[in-house]
Image: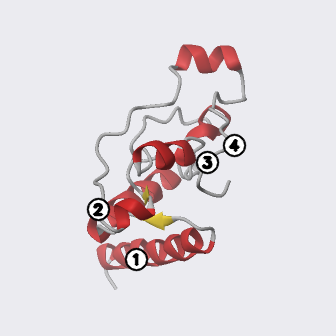
Amino acid sequence: MNDALQYQKQIESQYEKLKKEAEAAGYRLNPDIEFTRELVDGLLTNEKRYGYWACPCRLADGVERNDRDIICPCDYRDADLTEHGACYCGLYVSQVVIHEKISAGSIPERRPPKEKRDKIGEKPATSLNSSLDYPV
């Protein structure tokens, strides 16, 4: 089997696993399967590059300790789902988006700039909101 075909099978396998895990935890993946597979490809690429699933839509530092807040699923997913119907990269979407009652538009970046993250240390700045609609 050639490498490209084998890699496509790996993407599909990871997509199915991620979908099953997401649904078991009360989440939903983006229904645009091709888009979602591209994100899975990005996660696999980052796993090869860094050794962990850094968000494919953010610039990772390459040091896991510095990127913990953007390891998929990122620390900002639940707040983004609640406020915007999708996470920053669009991998996870809300039920409202699934049922096409709204479309997820551009999601603003919640991750603090590197300078602020450096001051905070290892603990990422997240908004703790007890009224989140999603499991944490």
Along the polypeptide, which appears first: circle 2 or circle 1?
1
The dot on residue 130 is: 4
Quarter of the image for residue 94 reads bottom left
Residue that numbered label 3 is attached to: 132
Residue that numbered label 1 is attached to: 12
Residue that numbered label 2 is attached to: 35
How far apart marks 4 and 1 lie (CA) works out to: 35 Å
**Disc 4 versus disc 2: nearer the observer:** 4
How far apart marks 3 and 1 lie (CA) works out to: 30 Å
**Label 3, residues with CA under 10 Å away: few <14, some 14-19, many ≥20:** some
Along the polypeptide, which appears first: circle 3 or circle 2?
2
Residue type, mark 1 in image: Glu
**Label 2, residues with CA under 10 Å away: few <14, some 14-19, many ≥20:** few
The dot on residue 28 is: none
Residue that appears at 30% across and 40% down: 106
Quarter of the image for residue 129 reads top right
Residue that appears at 41% across and 57% down: 91
How far apart marks 3 and 2 lie (CA) works out to: 26 Å
Residue type, mark 3 in image: Leu
